[in-house]
């Protein structure tokens, strides 16, 4: 069994502004951290060394499941500042950033990426804004409805969002036009969504799961899962994990049809979750603890308080390298330890001089 994500080393303060909100892996050992004031730090060597680029984007919110950026996968990234509606854009894997100016007349509340460079934004002013060139230019599609919240791309150009009075709107043409489907989820809004192909999608709404098999035209209520859910991750092969503010884990192995409550798992309230591959899942806590599962979320190990404060930033960089970032600006790095002498989190002095696949 792989021990990826098992051992973590404190690299010290990488971001002097603190408040790391998210970490984005861009491939080939390149990653960037975003912080609350709008600062960016960057690595090109799988997190061994970091460059502080300064405050180059807008303020970032602490919303791990709804980050303030879109990674287009080709070196192009946009960072969205929801309050003042500016958009910053990078075309060189986060090395430099350009402020595109004010995009919307009110706050930007939500976003969705459809692929092939097509993006839509929902504005506080009820307008929808759309780009077809990877965020370089934007068109105002005009007033659609009274505010747009929780916008998602399902697949094949289908997008959905809810307005202020809980009506669902749907687009089947990559966000160009929108139809009102009425109230679908009652007086609640989706907080998580996953697509499984062939028009099948599920969304988590408050404490319930809804499923569509026709690209979001109709939705079936699959019933209650649990309260306090704040994050989730799809691990493939029908396996979904939800974490809750009550420190529970809810797990499904059949694409969300049925759920098992694993009970209280975490030492502190979960802050973020990431898939490290091969069944390894890492959950960071708001109190600095890190929890790890190596069997697709069935069993969990508390690795202890890696940090002394909240850890919202987490990313898997590939090559068995993981990165964490906390709200004090510290960054932590994990690499694969030598297989013959595994490190034990309950014995911190054991394994300190192990040979490793790459240096920490």
Image (cartoon, rainbow, N blue to C red):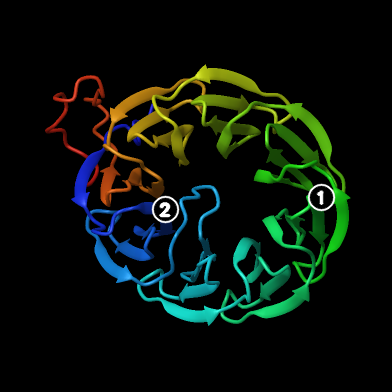
When the figure is inspected, residue 251 is found, relative to residue 62, above or below; the finding is above
Q: Does residue 360 show up? A: no
Residue 86 location (% of width, % of height): 52, 74
The reply, left or right, for residue 2 in relation to residue 129 is left
Residue reaching furthest to the top: 263
The residues tagged by marks 2 and 1 sit, at their Cα atoms, a distance apart of 29 Å
Which of these two is toward me, 328 or 146? 146
Q: Mark 2 points at which residue?
A: 22
The reply, left or right, for residue 346 in relation to residue 185 is left
Residue 208 location (% of width, % of height): 72, 32
**What residue do we see at 61% from left, 32% from top?**
239
> Which of the 4 quarters of the picture holds residue 4?
top left
**What residue do we see at 19% from left, 49% from top?**
12
Q: Are marks 2 and 1 in contact (CB under 8 Å)?
A: no
Of callouts 2 and 1, which one flags the residue occurring earlier in the amino acid sequence?
A: 2
The reply, left or right, for residue 355 in relation to residue 171 is left
Q: In which quarter of the image is the C terminus?
A: top left
Which of these two is toward me, 211 or 267? 267
**Label 1 neighbour load within 10 Å: few <14, some 14-19, many 20+:** many
When the figure is inspected, residue 359 is found, relative to residue 236, above or below; the finding is below
Q: Does residue 183 show up? A: yes
Considering the numbered disc 2 on the image, is that residue within a helix, a strand or a loop?
Answer: strand
Which of these two is toward me, 2 or 151? 151
The reply, left or right, for residue 100 in relation to residue 290 is right
When the figure is inspected, residue 272 is found, relative to residue 102, above or below; the finding is above
> Which of the 4 quarters of the picture holds residue 251?
top right
Q: In which quarter of the image is the N terminus?
A: top left
Residue 273 location (% of width, % of height): 47, 39
Considering the numbered disc 1 on the image, is that residue within a helix, a strand or a loop?
Answer: loop
* Residue 216: numbered disc: 1
């Amino acid at each position: 069994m792989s021990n990826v994500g098992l051992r973590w080393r404190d690299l010290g303060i990488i971001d002097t502004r603190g408040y790391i909100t998210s970490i984005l892996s861009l491939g080939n050992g390149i990653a960037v951290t975003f912080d609350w004031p709008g600062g960016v730090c960057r690595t090109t060597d799988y997190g061994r060394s970091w460059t502080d680029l300064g405050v180059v984007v807008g303020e970032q919110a602490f919303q791990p499941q709804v980050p303030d950026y879109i990674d287009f996968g080709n070196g192009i990234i946009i960072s969205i500042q929801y309050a003042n509606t500016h958009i910053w854009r990078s075309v060189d894997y986060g090395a430099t950033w350009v402020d595109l100016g004010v995009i919307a007349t009110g706050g930007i509340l939500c976003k969705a990426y459809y692929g092939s460079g097509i993006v839509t934004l929902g504005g506080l002013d009820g307008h929808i804004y759309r780009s077809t060139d990877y965020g370089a230019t934007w068109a105002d599609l005009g007033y659609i409805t009274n505010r747009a919240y929780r916008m998602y791309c399902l697949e094949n150009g289908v997008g959905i969002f809810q307005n202020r009075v809980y009506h669902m709107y749907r687009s089947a043409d990559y966000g160009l036009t929108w139809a009102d489907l009425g109230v679908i989820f009652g007086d609640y809004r989706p907080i998580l969504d996953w697509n499984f192909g062939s028009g099948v999608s599920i969304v988590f709404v408050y404490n319930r799961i809804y499923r569509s098999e026709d690209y979001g035209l109709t939705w079936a209520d699959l019933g209650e899962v649990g309260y306090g859910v704040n994050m989730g991750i799809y691990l493939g092969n029908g396996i979904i994990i939800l974490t809750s503010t009550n420190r529970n884990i809810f797990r499904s192995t059949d694409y969300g049809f049925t759920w098992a409550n694993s009970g209280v798992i975490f030492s502190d309230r979960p802050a973020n979750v990431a898939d490290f591959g091969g069944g390894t899942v890492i959950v960071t806590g708001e109190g600095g603890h890190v929890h790890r599962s190596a069997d697709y979320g069935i069993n969990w190990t508390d690795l202890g308080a890696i940090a002394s404060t909240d850890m919202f930033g987490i990313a898997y960089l590939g090559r068995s390298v993981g990165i964490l970032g906390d709200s004090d600006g510290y960054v932590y790095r994990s690499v694969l330890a030598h297989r013959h002498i595994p490190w034990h989190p309950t014995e911190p002095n054991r394994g300190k001089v192990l040979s490793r696949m790459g240096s920490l």
